[in-house]
Image (cartoon, helix red, strand yellow):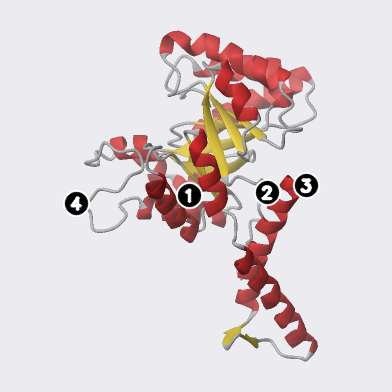
Amino acid sequence: MSHTIYQPVVSRLQRSELAVPGSNPSMIDKAADSAADYIFLDVEDAVAPPDKEQARANIIQALNDIDWKAKGKTISVRINGLDTHYMYRDVVDIMEQAGDKLDTILVPKVGVPADLYMVEAMCNQIEQAKGYTRQVGLEALIETALGMANVESIAQGSKRLEAMHFGVADYAASNRARTVNIGGLNPDYPGDQWHFALSRMTVACRAYGLRAIDGPFGDFNDPDGYILGAKRAAALGIEGKWAIHPSQIELANDVFSPPAAEVDRAHRILEALREAEAAGRGAAQLDGKMIDAASARMAENVVNIDQAIKARSA
């Protein structure tokens, strides 16, 4: 192990992340009572320009009126991009009027570390002015070629940064990919054309202690396609996926929850290695297979996520 180690910044259960347009208060109310681990109230792409101001007001009211923590939810807001004239008002109004109720701000189309620095500086000043005792976290949406080219430096771009998300639709547009599907596979491509991007972002996240989250799958009438995409992401080390429709919440929760048999085997691996250590051995055998310290680290990941899920259920 390198002498340089970045510990996880913040651990949050984020198997399913429900996207909710701020322009629809009834959807916000339903989201609060859903099975999603994570909610982000959106004032960006899901809200038309004439509705931005009202959506912002709806979000502020929802943050203040709903006890999100009591409902077991982590609550986030996706602000507008730094290249728009909406963004500064999003941060100022939401932070000043409800910043102490907010867990994270999701920053879209992050291209360089300075994008996070700008939002962080605004949050610093508002929190100091308002006397907030709790600091809001930041999450970066990687959805452009520039963002992916700078993903490693973005991962180190803010002390508030907790996670990075892969925004497949804008990423496809930015790269001029020949597709009009959001998250679906191109039959002309021999494999998963998003594999490299997802893997690169995930490596950057894990190197610097961040959570890695997969973005949307547009066809909510194709649960099988959603599940396949989620399973591919989980295999790379990603710990959750967006749900753009309530029907996708349980799909994400299921895919990103370790099966009972996997949890049981993880516990057995840890127990077998404890016994081996007590006997002065660095490795052991379990079910006819060799296990060692690396096996323990993999098993601990499984046990930790299982414990987080049980804690949320409780």
The residues bearing labels 2 and 4 have C-alpha atoms spaced at a distance of 38 Å
Q: Are marks 4 and 3 in contact (CB under 8 Å)?
A: no
Q: Earlier in the sequence, mark 2 or mark 1?
A: 2
Residue type beneath disc 3: Ala
The residues bearing labels 3 and 1 have C-alpha atoms spaced at a distance of 37 Å
Q: Which mark is residue 188?
A: 4
* Residue identified by numbered label 1: 152
Q: Which residue corresponds to the image point at 72% horizontal and 25% vertical from the top-left? A: 101
Residue type beneath disc 4: Asp
Q: Position of residue 150 (x, y in %)?
A: 42, 44
Q: Which mark's residue is nearer the viewer, 2 or 3? A: 3
* Residue identified by numbered label 3: 314
Looking at the image, the residue that sits furthest to the left is 188
Figure check: 142 above or below 29: below
Q: Which mark is residue 39?
A: none
Q: Which mark's residue is nearer the viewer, 4 or 3? A: 3
* Residue identified by numbered label 2: 11
Q: Which mark's residue is nearer the viewer, 1 or 4? A: 4
